[in-house]
Image (cartoon, rainbow, N blue to C red):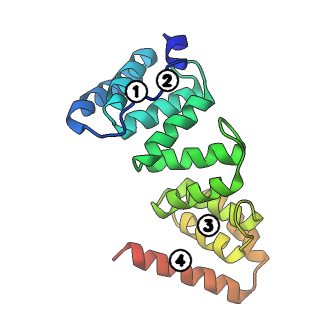
């Protein structure tokens, strides 16, 4: 089963959602996965994915990335994450950003990574917000901008993200009080826009 799934072309997966036909397969796959029946879970997720279930496509991407129930294949994982990202799955957008940042399953491309992290960050993904903050601090994939870096990190620090707290402190030491105030103003503006 593992070899067969690893060689399966992805073109048969439907880009169109059919929630009623796919939700039960997805739920079955999730229940089976939680019990450790990974190969059978893959089959259920495939059934749901064929009907366009974005979470099933995302879960298959994760399983191929980790080699759970299938042969590990980063190329297939990246393709699945792309499909789920096109359907609006934020976690898939984030994972694809991580793959481009590291060059896993796709060519390393910091610009594409930053763009993907930005999309996921705008949708509230804390990992993407943290990574985008670090990218702005280092100037990887985006112009170096400590104000943007601090703004993104401040958003995640408020949620208890420890790595963001350490990065925030290091970055703030390199900034003027005016720059810090500007970053804080951006955080307030974002907070107010998202909580209308």
Give the residue furthest to the right.
Answer: 174
| Quadrant the C terminus occupies | bottom left
Q: What is the CA distance from the residue labelled 4 to the residue labelled 1?
A: 43 Å
Residue located 68% across and 57% down the image: 111
For the residue pair 184 and 144, the one nearer the viewer reads as 144
Q: What is the CA distance from the residue labelled 1 to the residue labelled 3?
A: 40 Å
Q: Tell me where residue 49 appears, x and y as whole percent.
A: 37, 31
- Where on the picture, by quarter, is residue 105? top right
Which is nearer the N-term, disc 4 or disc 1?
1
> Mark 3, mark 2: which one is toward the viewer?
2
Badge 3: how crowded within 10 Å, few (<14), some, or many (20+)? many
Q: What is the CA distance from the residue labelled 3 to the residue labelled 2?
A: 39 Å
> Helix, strand or loop at disc 4?
helix
Q: Which residue is mark 4?
A: 187
**Residue 97 visible at all:** yes
Total number of numbered discs in the rendering: 4
Q: Tell me where residue 90 appears, x and y as whole percent.
A: 46, 51
């Amino acid at each position: 089963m593992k070899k067969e799934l690893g060689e399966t072309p992805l073109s048969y997966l439907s880009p169109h959602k059919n929630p009623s036909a796919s939700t039960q397969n997805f739920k079955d796959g999730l229940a089976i996965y939680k019990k450790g029946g990974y190969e059978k879970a893959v089959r259920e997720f495939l059934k749901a994915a064929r009907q366009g279930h974005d979470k099933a496509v995302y879960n298959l991407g994760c399983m191929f990335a980790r080699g759970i129930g299938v042969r590990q294949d980063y190329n297939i994982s990246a393709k699945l994450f792309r499909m789920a990202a096109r359907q609006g799955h934020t976690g898939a957008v984030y994972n694809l950003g991580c793959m481009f940042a590291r060059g896993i399953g796709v060519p390393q491309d910091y610009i594409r990574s930053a763009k993907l992290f930005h999309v996921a960050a705008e949708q509230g993904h804390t990992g993407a917000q943290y990574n985008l903050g670090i990218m702005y601090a280092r100037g990887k994939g985006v112009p170096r901008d400590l104000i943007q870096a601090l703004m993104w990190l401040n958003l995640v620090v408020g949620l208890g993200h420890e790595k963001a707290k350490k990065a925030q402190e290091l970055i703030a030491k390199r900034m003027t009080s005016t720059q810090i105030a500007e970053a804080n103003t951006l955080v307030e503006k974002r907070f107010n826009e998202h909580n209308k």
